[in-house]
């Protein structure tokens, strides 16, 4: 038996926008929770990211399937009262507005738990509640502030990771923390305050580089698709223009690589390549040798040699290649009359999946009547 509706019966209320909180609430909804997405009267600005879903945003569709949409004005006393009534019945209150914006309107965890002791509140911020609380934080900016860009890219120039890794990792961390809080609530009967900052999440993910700086003589330099101390390691061009990623991690693999892949068994005893440190020191010569062999082979032929030799490898695929990949599991999401095909979650639930994306304030009237 797999996972199926394990959060069924729970109510999640999310005052959310952009990516981080919507990604978190989408995963909670996929586990069976009812998710009410609270939007500004003009809607989540992510609705305007693109027009790939029949004139509506395909990116918004990916992040917001299975939710109910309710537009409210938090500065309106009637709407604020409606949100308070909903929260007396909620299990989780999630938000990623500017730090303090909900608390200033009386929606702090402590205030809300006076009427709903079991409520779990989770705030997603850019830099926490201290020194950086007032700063605007977008994924790209936190990538830079956390040092991620300094270890990403080539020797010539830094680069950002080409997807919103800060938003997604923060949403995933918030999701994990909320599940922990729900387990704790089964023991205590009480909710708790959670606060997750994008900067803290990326600082944690940067620990390998941070440890290098503090304890190993320096952070890893930007190296593109190569490695800072392993060789052969990287992307190698085949004769048909494709590129193959490979990594040789030990002398046993090196011997197999020489014999079965490049057909140069004499290199096993060559002092220039005796150990990884030697191979790395002579990596320019080594890469020329490998490239010379691969230039006479197609991408498929290179992989056909690497696989039996048990050398770790992968194709350097494009997004178009990923879209047609045999291992890719897809989920079809419906946004109005449009269908959007997205990659499914790594651990999907079984049974009926919620795949409908709400129009702006689609459930407003129904929810207002329910909590009148």
Image: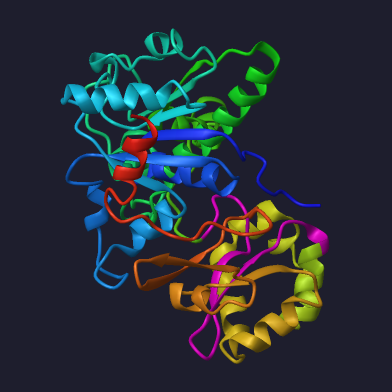
Q: In the rendered view, does 111 fall on the left or right side of 172?
A: left
Whether 155 is drawn above or below 233: the answer is above
Colour convention: rainbow
Task: Point out residue 68 in the picture as x, y percentages from the top left corner.
Answer: 39, 47
Task: Point out residue 316 in the picture as x, y percentages from the top left corner.
Answer: 52, 72
Quarter occupied by residue 291:
bottom right
Query: 64 or 228, which is in the foreground?
Result: 64
Q: In the rendered view, does 38 fall on the left or right side of 232?
A: left
Task: Point out residue 129 in the picture as x, y percentages from the top left corner.
Answer: 33, 17
Task: Point out residue 231 in the picture as x, y percentages from the top left corner.
Answer: 63, 60
Residue at x 55% of width, y 29% of height: 178
The span shown in magenta is: 226-252
Quarter occupied by residue 271:
bottom right
Q: Is 238 part of what is drawn in magenta?
A: yes
Residue 218 visible in image = no
Residue 329 visible in image = yes
Query: 215 or 125, which is in the foreground?
Result: 125
Query: 60 or 239, which is in the foreground?
Result: 60
Query: 307 or 233, which is in the foreground?
Result: 307
Whether 174 is drawn above or below 224: the answer is above
Q: Is 169 part of what is drawn in magenta?
A: no
The C terminus, quarter of image: top left
Residue at x 63% of width, y 64% of height: 232
């Amino acid at each position: 038996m797999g996972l199926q509706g394990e959060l069924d019966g729970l109510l999640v209320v999310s005052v959310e926008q952009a990516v981080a909180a919507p990604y978190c609430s989408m995963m909670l909804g996929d586990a069976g929770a009812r998710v009410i997405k609270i939007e500004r009267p003009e809607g989540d600005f992510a609705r305007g990211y693109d027009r790939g879903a029949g004139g509506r945003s395909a990116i918004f569709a990916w992040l917001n399937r299975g939710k109910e949409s309710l537009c409210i004005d938090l500065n309106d006393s009637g709407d604020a009262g409606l949100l308070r009534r909903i929260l007396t019945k909620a299990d989780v209150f999630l938000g990623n507005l500017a730090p303090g914006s909900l608390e200033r309107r009386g929606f702090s965890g402590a205030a809300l738990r006076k009427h709903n002791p079991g409520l779990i509140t989770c705030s997603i911020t850019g830099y926490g509640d201290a020194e950086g609380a007032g700063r605007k934080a977008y994924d790209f900016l936190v990538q830079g502030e956390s040092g991620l860009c300094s270890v990403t890219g080539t020797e010539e120039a830094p680069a950002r990771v080409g997807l919103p890794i800060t938003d997604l990792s923060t949403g995933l961390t918030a999701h994990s923390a909320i599940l922990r809080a729900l387990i704790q609530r089964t023991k205590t009967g009480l909710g708790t305050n959670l606060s997750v900052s994008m900067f803290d999440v990326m600082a944690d993910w940067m620990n390998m580089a941070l440890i290098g700086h503090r304890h190993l003589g320096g952070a890893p330099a930007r190296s593109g698709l190569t490695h800072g101390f392993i060789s052969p390691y990287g992307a190698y061009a085949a004769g048909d223009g494709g590129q193959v990623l490979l990594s040789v991690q030990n002398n046993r693999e090196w011997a197999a690589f020489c014999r079965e892949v490049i057909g140069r068994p004499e290199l096993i005893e060559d002092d220039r390549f005796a150990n990884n440190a030697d191979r790395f020191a002579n990596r320019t010569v080594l890469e020329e040798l490998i490239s010379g062999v691969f230039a006479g082979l197609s991408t498929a032929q290179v992989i056909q040699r690497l696989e039996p030799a048990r050398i770790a490898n992968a194709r350097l695929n494009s997004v178009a290649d990923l879209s047609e990949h045999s291992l890719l599991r897809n989920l079809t999401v419906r946004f109005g009359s449009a269908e959007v095909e997205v990659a499914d979650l790594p651990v999907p639930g079984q049974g009926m999946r919620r795949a409908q994306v709400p129009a702006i304030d689609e459930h407003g009237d129904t929810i207002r009547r329910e909590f009148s």
